[in-house]
Image (cartoon, helix red, strand yellow):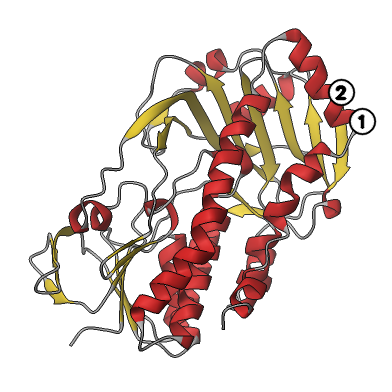
Amino acid sequence: MSSKFTIVGAGISGLMLGCTLRMNSIDCTIYERSHHISEYDAGITISPNGFRLLEEIDILEKLRDVSCRPLNVVYRNVNGSVIKSIPLNVFGKIITTNRKELIKLLYDQYLNMNGDIQFDHEVIDINQQQKKIIFKNSDEQNYKNIAACDGIKSSVRDKGSNIKKTSHYSGFSAWRGIGSSDSKNINIYLGSDSHVVCYPINDKLQTSFTGIYKTSNSAEESWRREGSHAELSEDLKSYDAFLHSLFYSSKKVFRWGLYQRDKLDTFKINDITLLGDAAHPMLPFLAQGANMALEDAFIFGTLAKYFINDFEKIQNYYEKLRLSRVHAIQTASEKQAFYNHVSNPILVKVRNFLLKNTNIALRRTKNIYNYNALNELNKII
C-alpha cells in the first residue's frame, strides 16, 4: 500500500509539506536521495510571508532561538558609506538564520508528528501507467500522487513529464560564505556591476554574505563548489575593508553561476505536483526562494486537508493560488538584478537618490511581504 501522499525531497518545501500534512493527520512518506538531511550552511531570510507559516506548524519560537533579528537594513556604497538606513521593523517580522537550522527544525517537527522518511532513495524512473516510482537502490513503490520537492534539477519533473526546463546562464555569478563580524544590520552594498548582502544569522553574530557580480565567465551551477579566498577577493576587490575582513573570516567560500529557467505554464503533470525550486527556481535578488517554498508547501498541504478525496481539485486550486504569484516574483527578481548592478554613473545617482529620498525599498517588498497564505486559502475553503 502507498501512503496518501508521496513526497520526493527533504529540503524546505518537502519537509514543510510533510509537517503540514501530518498536522492535518494526513499520511505521507518523504523519499530523500541523500543519507541524511542537509547540513550545508547558508544564510537565508525569513520574511513576514514565510514567518507566519512557521508559526502555524509551531517551530517559529525554536527558530528564533537560533536565529537573529537584525536592527536595520542599511544600503551602502562600495566604500561603506551609508545611502540609507531603515529600521527592520518597518518591513515587518523578519529573521535571518542558517538554512541548516531551519531544515533541522522542520525535520525534527516532522518526526515528532510521526512522519515517515526514507533516506538513500534517489528517483531514477517513474512509471505513470503502473503508478510506480523506481529508486536507484532497487526499491520500487506504488504511489497515489507525488509532490516533487526535489529542487532545481528535479528528477521527478524530468522523469515524469515532457517538460523541457531549459536553463541559460544569467550573466551573474555569486560567492557565499559564513564568517563573523560586529554588525547587527542587514548590509546591502551596491557596486558597479556587483552587489554584496551580509547579515548576522544568530546572536553570536556569525555573518552570512552573498556577493553577486556580472561576468561572462560562467561558473558551475552547483552552490556547493568550493572556491578560494584569493579568487573571491579579486572578483569583489572594490569593496571596503569590513567586507574583506568578513570574507577572510569564513572558513570556506563557495562560488556558483546563476542560471535562469523558463517559467512553467503549469505546476501539475497528471498525478505529479511541482513545489519549490522544482516548479519555479528564482534568482536570489529578493531573497524569496525559501519563503516561496514555505508558501507552496503550506498551501498544498492545507488544500489536501479539505479536498483529500479529490486530488484534481487540490492541484487546480494549488495552481490557481501559486502560478501568478511566483511568476510575478520571478519577474521582480530579474528586474531587481538590473537595479542592483547598474554601472552607468547617471543611473547610479538616480537609484541612490530614490533609495535615499523615497520609500522605494518598502514599495518593492510590500506585495511580497504582505501576502498571507491563510487569507488566500480562506477565499477557497
Specify the amino acid type for callout 1: Asn
Where residue 165 appears, x then y in whole percent? 30, 42
Position of the N terminus, as image quadrant, is bottom left
Task: Tell me if residue 95 can be seen.
Answer: no
The image quadrant of residue 115 is bottom left
Identify the mark at residue 137; answer none if there is no mark: none
Where residue 44 appears, x then y in whole percent? 59, 49
* Rendered residue at 60%/74% (across/down): 59
* Rendered residue at 68%/62% (across/down): 371
The image quadrant of residue 141 is bottom left
* Rendered residue at 45%/23% (across/down): 228
Specify the amino acid type for callout 2: Phe
Q: Is residue 17 left or right of residue 50?
A: left
Identify the mark at residue 353; answer none if there is no mark: 2
Element assignment for label 1? helix
Q: In the image, is residue 8 above or below residue 211? A: below
Q: Residue furthest top?
A: 345
Q: In the image, is residue 27 above or below residue 60? A: below
The image quadrant of residue 159 is bottom left
* Rendered residue at 35%/86% (across/down): 27
Position of the C terminus, as image quadrant, is bottom right
Identify the mark at residue 357; answer none if there is no mark: 1
Label 2 neighbour load within 10 Å: few <14, some 14-19, many 20+: few
Q: Nearer the viewer, residue 270 or 205?
A: 270
Q: Marks 1 and 2: CB-CB under 8 Å?
A: yes
Where residue 280 appears, x then y in whole percent? 44, 49
